[in-house]
């Protein structure tokens, strides 16, 4: 206890002496100013490769498919299933920026077709919306393969159709047959540069201006018709809820040319999972046919949309299969 008292007394004396010091400038040296916390560096927006192509490229597709067996010219064919598939490697294609020298390839599972400039039946030009390849087998009657590309991939030849001047999404339609009476298959796929998930909008509702291409196979009694399908789509996406609402107003195009014929109006709805840029859904109750849709967003901040759809059922007294694609932009 004595030593503790002595230490405390010494400390007190030191304090008294310090308070009586003759120093005229007792101000302490200021502490260094705190360094401001740096602001977080904003994440740079992703960059996207764009159409038209600068070089040959390969793509996976979001696709739809159907099939039929028989000769439509001689009676009723046997219809296969109609289905959709999200982005995958099962249907894949290779395309080029130079149609005169490039090789164009499309592959579904183990089936493949290759095309070069000698197989072009419709050349790319601003006046056309699609360029087309076709091969016909010289040994097997009715064996063919036909590939139709949206004309937005070849530099200087992009379609002048404003709604189809798309820079991040495109489509290809592949129609082929084994023989006159054999199996025929139709596959449509959308492809391109999908929106990075961190670049997806999460608020607001966005309308897209979109168009349709596809095929309809219709069997009524002993009559079969295979028609090309076109039309317009009203597309609205609520990025806050993830709902994709579609209204498809479709026409069929006469094989010999002429004005489009009104076919039907279909409504469909899809859902975007949280943190994704792909979606899927179904035709809504009340649509003439039942079916599914699968699609995705392409380019910066989901500026473009691509969808594949497939449907089946009885409509206008005929058993039908419908497949096609939808492409559009904000």
Image (tube, grey):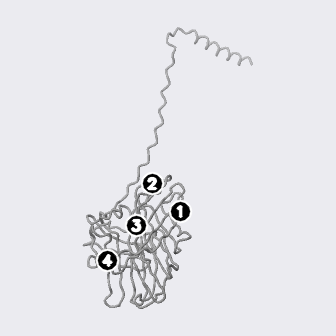
Reading the image, the residue beneath label 4 is: 133
Q: How many angstroms separate mark 4 from mark 3 (CA)?
A: 22 Å
- Residue visible at 50% across and 63% down in the picture: 245
For mark 4, give the secondary structure.
Answer: strand
Q: Is residue 98 left or right of residue 327?
A: left
Q: Position of residue 287 (x, y in %)?
A: 52, 71
Residue 296 - label = none
The crowd level at tag 4 (other Cα within 10 Å; few <14, some 14-19, many 20+) is many
Do the residues under discs 2 and 1 have CB atoms within 8 angstroms? no
The crowd level at tag 3 (other Cα within 10 Å; few <14, some 14-19, many 20+) is many
Q: Quadrant of residue 9?
A: top right
Q: How many angstroms separate mark 1 from mark 3 (CA)?
A: 20 Å
> Which quadrant is home to the N terminus?
top right
Q: Position of residue 286 (x, y in %)?
A: 55, 71
The crowd level at tag 1 (other Cα within 10 Å; few <14, some 14-19, many 20+) is many
Q: Earlier in the sequence, mark 2 or mark 3?
A: 2
Reading the image, the residue beneath label 2 is: 199
- Residue visible at 40% across and 54% down in the picture: 46
Q: How many angstroms separate mark 2 from mark 3 (CA)?
A: 24 Å
Residue 271 - label = 1
**In this view, the mark in front (4 or 2):** 4
Do the residues under discs 1 and 3 have CB atoms within 8 angstroms? no
Q: Position of residue 205 (x, y in %)?
A: 49, 55
Q: Position of residue 295 (x, y in %)?
A: 47, 66
Q: Earlier in the sequence, mark 4 or mark 2?
A: 4
Q: Earlier in the sequence, mark 1 or mark 3?
A: 3
For mark 3, give the secondary structure.
Answer: strand
């Amino acid at each position: 206890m004595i030593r503790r008292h002595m230490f405390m007394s010494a400390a007190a004396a030191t304090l008294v002496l310090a308070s009586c010091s003759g120093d005229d400038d007792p101000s302490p040296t200021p502490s260094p100013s705190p360094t401001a916390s740096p602001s977080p560096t904003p994440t740079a927006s992703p960059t996207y490769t764009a159409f038209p192509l600068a070089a040959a490229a390969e793509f996976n597709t979001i696709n739809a498919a159907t099939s039929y067996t028989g000769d439509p010219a001689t009676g009723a064919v046997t219809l296969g299933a109609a289905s959709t598939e999200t982005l995958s490697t099962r249907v894949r294609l290779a395309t080029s920026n130079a149609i005169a020298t490039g090789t164009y390839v499309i592959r579904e599972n183990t089936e493949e077709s290759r095309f070069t400039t000698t197989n072009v039946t419709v050349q790319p030009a601003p006046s056309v919306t699609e360029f087309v390849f076709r091969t016909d087998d010289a040994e097997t009657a009715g064996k063919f393969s036909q590939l139709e590309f949206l004309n937005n991939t070849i530099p200087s030849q992009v379609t002048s159709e404003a709604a189809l001047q798309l820079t991040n999404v495109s489509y290809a339609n592949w129609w082929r047959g084994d023989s006159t009476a054999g199996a025929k298959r139709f596959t449509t796929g959308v492809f391109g540069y999908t929106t990075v998930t961190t670049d997806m909008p999460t608020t607001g509702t966005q309308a897209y201006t979109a168009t349709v291409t596809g095929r309809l196979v219709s069997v009524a009694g002993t009559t079969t018709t295979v028609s090309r399908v076109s039309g317009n789509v009203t597309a609205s996406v609520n990025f806050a809820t993830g709902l994709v609402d579609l209204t498809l107003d479709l026409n069929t195009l006469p094989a010999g040319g002429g004005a489009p014929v009104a076919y039907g109006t279909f409504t469909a709805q899809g859902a975007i999972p949280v943190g994704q840029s792909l979606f899927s859904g179904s035709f809504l109750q009340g649509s003439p046919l039942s079916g599914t849709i699968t699609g995705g967003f392409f380019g910066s901040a989901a500026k473009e949309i691509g969808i594949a759809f497939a449907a089946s059922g009885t409509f206008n007294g005929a058993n039908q299969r419908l497949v096609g694609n939808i492409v559009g932009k904000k």
